[in-house]
Image: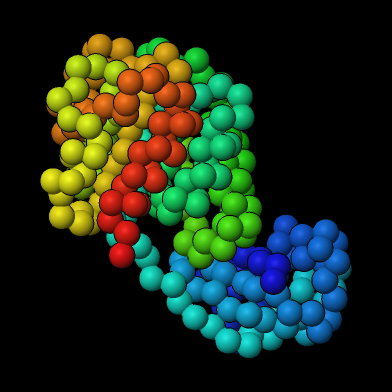
Amino acid sequence: MDRFFLSPDQWNENPTLRGDEAHHCLRVMRKQVGDKIAIFDGNGREASARICGVSKNESRLELIDTKNTSAVLPQLEVAVGIPKGKSFDLILQKAVEMGVNRIQPLVSDQGNVRFKTGEALAKRDKWQRILLEACKQCGQNHLPEVMVPVLLDSYLEKIKPGGTRIIGALTSETKTLKELLDGLEVPERVVLMVGPEGDFSAGEYEKIFESGFAPVGLGELVLRTETAVIWMAAAVRFQFQP
């Protein structure tokens, strides 16, 4: 069944798809009055619905049944140096499938991505749309949030306290990711960090370690940024799956 996003404030007596979601429903997927669709609100709520009326820019719905999907623990945050090209789009898509809750793009000393004034906000909006489309495609009912890109120093200064913090590092590690995870009970929150294509500088690593990130090795090969993110997120989900 085709899935569409209905924002939480629209789950009322007259649920209605509007804007881009109405266009996707009516113009792209060619849905008509009487067709059944699935809707979700990004916070775990999902329902089957029947289209009961359409206009040029709206699709009015009748909810048939509703259910809630519980959030999976641990909460998972990824902070990643932004790679060039479309690699970050792949990170976002796979983050949805791995149940990542929050993605923080990082601008760092040796990264190759920089933003002009105002460009970062536009990028963030584009990335959030990618997350939404990935949720619709894979059946994820919890919509992750991607943040506006920030400098690494700013992120470390404002990071939410607590949580298990892990960085995939190319420095001298003492543990593998498996060894670190095997020593944990199910944490409430895990923060994973991965550097950009040029890796973090020595000075940045020092600040990262001072902020409580434990360095781990990811094997003998040097992984691309997007591969490392997927590898680490998948390992955390596998380790603590119900």
Residue 163, above or below 141: above
Q: Position of residue 120 (x, y in %)?
A: 53, 31
Q: Is residue 154 visible?
A: no
Question: Please, is residue 79 above or below residue 60 in the view?
Answer: above
**Residue 202 location, quadrant:** top left
Q: Quadrant of the N terminus?
A: bottom right
Residue drawn at (76%, 74%), measured in percent from left and top?
Answer: 59
Q: Nearer the viewer, residue 217 or 68?
A: 217
Drawn side of residue 137 relative to residue 96, left or right: right
Q: Is residue 6 above or below residue 223?
A: below
Q: Is residue 143 visible?
A: yes
Q: Residue 51 location, x and y as percent?
A: 76, 80
Residue 90 in picture, x, y percent from top left: 56, 37
Residue drawn where x is 71% and y is 62% of the image:
21
Task: Kindly identify the residue that appears in the image at 50 percent across and 57 percent down.
Answer: 143
Assign the C terminus to one quadrant of the image.
Answer: bottom left
In the picture, measured across the screen, residue 15 lies left or right of residue 208, that is right
For residue 55, which quarter of the picture? bottom right
- Residue 39 lies, with reference to residue 29, above or below; the image says below
| Near-viewer residue (46 or 106) | 46
